[in-house]
Image: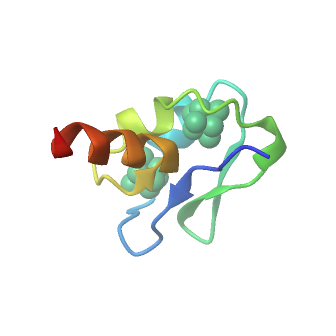
Amino acid sequence: MQPFPMIHQELCTGCHRCIDTCPTHALAQIEGKAQLYQPDKCTYCTACEDICPEQAIELPFLIVFAANQSAT
Ligand code: SF4
Ligand code: SF4
């Protein structure tokens, strides 16, 4: 099973950019915050993480990759 994007609710301002950007409509705005509404549709393309101005979205495998890079 693939990992899913994590949306930090405390950082999300509800700007809607990630929802508008997601090519598969996996995200939705619920009670003013972005949520991974349809996880089975997520292709892990990273577009939502790239566009979020608040760094509220993390894609876990990229965090591991970044940690490996900084250790070298
Ligand atoms: S990683 Fe891509 S497909 Fe998945 S929620 Fe973000 S924009 Fe949508
Ligand atoms: S782009 Fe970031 S701040 Fe804007 S709705 Fe999505 S998660 Fe929230």
Work out whether residue 15 or residue 39 is closer to the camera in this orientation and state it.
39
**Residue most toward the bottom?**
10
- Up-down: is 8 above or below 53? below
- Up-down: is 36 above or below 19? below
Q: Kindly indicate the quadrant of the structure image that contains residue 69.
A: top left
Image quadrant for the C terminus? top left
Left or right: 35 with respect to 72? right
Question: How far across and down, in percent of the image, does residue 4 sit?
Answer: 64, 50
Residue in the image at 50% along x and 40% along y: 18
Q: Kindly indicate the quadrant of the structure image that contains residue 42.
A: top right
Q: Give the number of callouts.
A: 0
**Residue 15 visible in the current orientation:** no
**Residue most toward the front?**
72
**Residue 66 visible in the current orientation:** yes
Left or right: 4 with respect to 41? left
Residue in the image at 38% along x and 48% along y: 63
Question: How far across and down, in percent of the image, does residue 45 sit?
Answer: 57, 26
Q: How is the image coloured?
A: rainbow
Question: How far across and down, in percent of the image, does residue 66 sit?
Answer: 30, 41
> Ligand 1 sits in which quadrant?
top right
Work out whether residue 71 or residue 45 is closer to the camera in this orientation and state it.
71
- Up-down: is 11 above or below 19? below
Question: How far across and down, in percent of the image, does residue 68 sit?
Answer: 30, 42
Residue in the image at 18% along x and 46% along y: 71
Residue in the image at 29% along x and 54% along y: 54
